[in-house]
Image: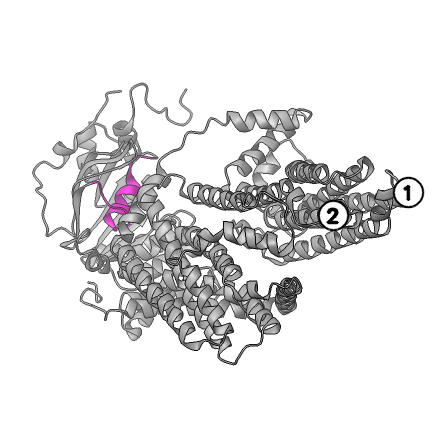
């Protein structure tokens, strides 16, 4: 019957087939983008180049600033690189763990591949390569600007570039393997709600590390002395057994034109990376089917959720809504609470901001100086606004697309479509407004801003929340993606990209106004007056009006389209 | 209505486990945490037959299929496919089998044709043979209009057709299908039923799990009914009628065998 019954492929043949399959997918993807949306592809590339340029300028400025403090030795010292690579390793490990879990132990592709006569090791090797490729993005995005910024601030020889490249790419294999092993560990021994476990652990590690770092120096020392104290206190991360230390020492040696030592550390990194890769592929190659089976066991085991907590929260936040809308809100709130990706991103972003804000007074910046105070307040609002723009583009924008896929169900409910749109907007505004205004409130309190300026900051922050939520919901309704259930893919489509761009433009506009207020009025008036001038209040009113108009306009456009939408 | 629960030992009485069977499950058990999904299931399927596996939602049908195809590991018991132990010689066993799940997976950024070519190459089918089979499948399943589009644009029915074609490309000795006709048009359903019969007539085995009792009644040579993880009935339609002491359609037998304590399910229109 089966003509393939006796086929026995050469070892590695499956690997070649899988790699070719990936290559064809990549080719189709590129072809689709170039043919389907060349303008958008070009725009994304331009944005990427701009991000690279901005990172390069930022890093070059940091290095220049450190030089200006007379801390040239610090640059040459490994401290900066040790910390850079340590943080990078943690980030790459977690991102790899999350992605690998989905691809090796998820239901779809993993199940398909497992059902085919492929060697488990071949599949694992492909996933290992994918991890390396993903990690290598960090080189393109962060490594290249850093390499060029160093070369800009320090005299280097030609061999510095290939050595830097070798060190960076040799290093990323290690977090890629650690990510694979972390996902495997969760699948084998903690299969119930695995993503939540990985994300919660990641949040805990990152927040603990940040909190620990924020408490390192207990005195507000200045400049070099302060920096030396800090470096001495955090010397624990310079463990000679950590790969980040080897990579840092190797790069510093390349900068110092010590080729021999740089090559030595490169071999250490490559040797350890190769051994860890061999170990990972062998462990996972032997036990992938078992780990997959265990992961499904956890996934299929029912989790009883009574939902009382979300009910209480929903009642507390939206008690004023009519019953029908309140029920729609409860549904969205439960979706948010049960999607670890959403709340973890909010938690990490705003957790970091809270830690930063709580430590504002201990920064080596003279916050009694009105100019500095104004600058820090402006930067705080800018940071919060940019985080909000990212969050709404990634998580709020797809809400209407996902809802529209069950439009037949919505149609049967006694709720108008535009009402549903308003419920989504209110939900997004509540989540973003509460988080952002709480952080901004804390920030203005720590900065001890005068009451009028404090209210100005918080009210503009709330206005930005209105604008961004309105934009994401409105454009989400105007450009719904009806053939995809993946929120990340919905957000990366045309409408999502447009929403991100418009959101960024909106934030830039608002911050330009705030900047005008800050630098032309606020910093001066701190010394003389506790209140804003009439022109200042006018500007605040203008900024708030722009926010309302942007939010309402986008919602109106979205509502018109959503009312007529057919699926 | 009398409760008719048939123990799996009784069901399998007189049919010892044989490695000659195309598919042989021996005392297979599987649980998800504290919840047992399959309990000491023994089952043998032979070449030349279409076997329909029926059961209420959550009875353990899909779990059994996944254990059979090597996607899930049984907590206890053994599985052989064409004489190959799935847990020890899984790759050789998978070479003989093909599985089409109820929600078929295709790579979004591959066309249907590229996906089938990938399956052809993984199973080691010579290109010429594969192309010949593919041409035949394209015609029979009416896939010509969409096979060169990216799979991300496919409807459920299109995905089902492509997944079935990819599964058939190596002419498997055992075809395992979960809900094979959901989302398909009547013409394609007819074609698929014909293909199943051709596989069986050619000496192969079709192991399908379905809720569509009409299809099971129409094409299955033997039927197994699983309830709460236990095989409660096994045999031809006539044998099941005898076991259930009930005449009529497969639907009547199924409802009779799987009903819990209490009244039966009323007929449409019956009060």
**Which residue is rendered at x = 59% and y = 48% of the image?**
A398
Give the percent coordinates (x, y) of residue B260: 29, 23
Image position of B262 with respect to A223: above or below: above
Q: Nearer the viewer, residue B182 or B230?
A: B230
Q: Nearer the viewer, residue A519 or B25?
A: A519
**According to the image, label 1 marks what residue?**
A533
Query: Would you identify the image quadrant in which residue A40 lies?
Result: bottom right
Q: Nearer the viewer, residue B126 or A289?
A: A289
**Which residue is rendered at x = 48% and y = 59% of the image?**
A82
* Mark number displayed over residue A54: none
Q: Nearer the viewer, residue B92 or A550?
A: A550
Q: What is the secondary structure assignment of the residue under circle 2?
A: helix
Pointer 2 and pointer 1: residues touching (CB < 8 Å)?
no
**According to the image, label 2 marks what residue?**
A554
A564 left or right of B33 in image: right
Find the magenta span and give its range.
Answer: B58-75
Q: Earlier in the sequence, mark 2 or mark 1?
A: 1
Give the percent coordinates (x, y) of residue A173: 40, 63
């Amino acid at each position: 019957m089966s003509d393939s019954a006796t086929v026995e492929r050469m070892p590695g043949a499956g690997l070649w087939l899988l790699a070719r399959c990936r290559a064809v997918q990549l080719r189709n993807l590129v072809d689709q983008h170039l043919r389907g949306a060349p303008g958008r592809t070009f725009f994304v590339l331009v944005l990427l180049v701009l991000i690279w340029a901005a990172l390069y300028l930022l890093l070059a400025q940091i290095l220049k600033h450190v030089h200006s403090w007379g801390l040239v030795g610090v640059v040459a010292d490994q401290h900066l690189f040790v910390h850079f690579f340590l943080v990078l390793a943690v980030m790459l490990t977690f991102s790899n763990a999350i992605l690998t879990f989905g691809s090796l132990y998820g239901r779809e592709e993993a199940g398909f591949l497992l059902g085919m006569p492929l060697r488990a090791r071949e599949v694992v090797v492909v996933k290992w390569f994918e991890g390396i490729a993903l990690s290598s993005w960090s080189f393109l995005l962060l490594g290249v600007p850093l390499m060029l910024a160093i070369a800009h601030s320090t005299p280097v020889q030609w061999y510095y570039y290939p050595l830097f490249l070798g060190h960076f790419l040799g290093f990323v294999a290690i977090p890629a393997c650690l990510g694979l092993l972390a996902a495997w560990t969760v699948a084998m021994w903690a299969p119930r709600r695995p993503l939540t476990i990985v994300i919660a652990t990641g949040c805990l590690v990152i927040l603990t590390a940040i909190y620990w770092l924020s408490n390192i120096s207990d005195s507000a020392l200045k400049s070099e002395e302060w920096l030396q104290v800090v470096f001495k206190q955090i010397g624990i991360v310079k463990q000679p057994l950590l790969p980040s230390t080897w990579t840092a020492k190797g790069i510093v040696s390349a900068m110092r034109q010590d080729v021999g030592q740089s090559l030595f550390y490169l071999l250490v990194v490559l040797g350890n990376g190769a051994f860890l890769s061999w170990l990972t592929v062998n462990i996972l190659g032997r036990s992938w089917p078992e780990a997959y089976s265990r992961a499904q066991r956890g996934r299929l085991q029912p989790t009883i959720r009574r939902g009382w907590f979300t009910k209480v929260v929903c009642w507390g936040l939206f008690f004023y809504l009519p019953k029908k809308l309140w029920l729609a809100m409860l549904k969205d709130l439960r979706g948010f609470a049960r999607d670890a990706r959403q709340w973890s991103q909010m938690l990490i972003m705003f957790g970091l901001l809270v830690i930063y804000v709580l430590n504002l007074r201990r920064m080596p910046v003279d916050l009694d100086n009105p100019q500095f105070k104004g600058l820090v307040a402006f930067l705080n609002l800018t940071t919060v606004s940019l985080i909000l723009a990212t969050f709404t583009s990634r998580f709020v924008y797809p809400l209407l697309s996902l809802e529209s896929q069950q439009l037949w169900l919505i149609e049967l409910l006694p709720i108008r479509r535009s009402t549903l749109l308003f419920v989504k907007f209110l939900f997004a505004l509540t989540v973003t407004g509460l988080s952002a205004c709480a952080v901004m409130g804390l920030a203005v309190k720590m900065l001890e801003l005068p009451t009028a300026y404090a209210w100005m900051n918080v009210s503009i922050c709330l206005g930005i929340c209105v604008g961004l939520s309105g934009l994401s919901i409105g454009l989400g309704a105007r450009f719904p993606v009806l053939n995809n259930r993946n929120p990340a893919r919905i957000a990366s489509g045309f409408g999502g990209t447009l929403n991100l761009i418009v959101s960024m433009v909106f934030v830039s506009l608002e911050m330009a106004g705030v900047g005008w207020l800050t630098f032309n009025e606020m910093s001066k008036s701190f010394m003389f007056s506790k209140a804003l001038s009439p022109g200042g209040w006018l500007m605040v009113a203008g900024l708030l009006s722009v926010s309302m108009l942007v939010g309402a306009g986008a919602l109106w456009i979205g509502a018109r389209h959503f009312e007529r939408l057919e699926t | 209505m009398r409760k008719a629960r048939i123990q799996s030992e009784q069901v399998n009485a007189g049919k010892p486990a044989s490695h000659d069977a195309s598919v042989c499950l021996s005392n297979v058990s599987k649980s998800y945490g504290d919840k047992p999904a399959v309990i000491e299931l023994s089952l043998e399927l032979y070449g030349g037959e279409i076997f329909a596996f029926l059961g209420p939602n959550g009875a353990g049908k899909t779990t059994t299929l996944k254990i059979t195809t090597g996607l899930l590991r049984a907590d206890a018991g053994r599985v052989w496919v064409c004489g190959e132990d799935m847990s020890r010689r899984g790759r050789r066993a998978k070479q003989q089998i093909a599985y089409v799940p109820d929600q078929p997976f295709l790579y979004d950024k591959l066309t249907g044709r590229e996906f089938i070519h990938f399956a052809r190459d993984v199973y080691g089918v010579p290109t010429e043979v594969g192309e010949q089979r593919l041409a035949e499948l394209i015609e029979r399943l009416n896939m010509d209009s969409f096979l060169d589009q990216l799979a991300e644009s496919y409807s459920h029915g299109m995905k089902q057709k492509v997944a079935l074609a990819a599964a058939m490309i190596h002419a498997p000795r055992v075809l395992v299908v979960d809900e094979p006709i959901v989302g398909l048009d009547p013409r394609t359903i007819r074609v698929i039923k014909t293909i199943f019969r051709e596989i069986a007539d050619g000496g192969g085995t079709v192991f399908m799990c379905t809720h569509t009792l009409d299809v099971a009644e129409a094409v299955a040579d033997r039927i197994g009914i699983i309830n709460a993880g236990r095989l409660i009935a096994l045999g031809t339609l006539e044998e099941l009628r005898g076991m259930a002491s009930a005449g009529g359609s497969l639907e009547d037998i199924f409802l009779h065998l799987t009903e819990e304590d209490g009244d039966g399910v009323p007929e449409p229109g019956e009060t």
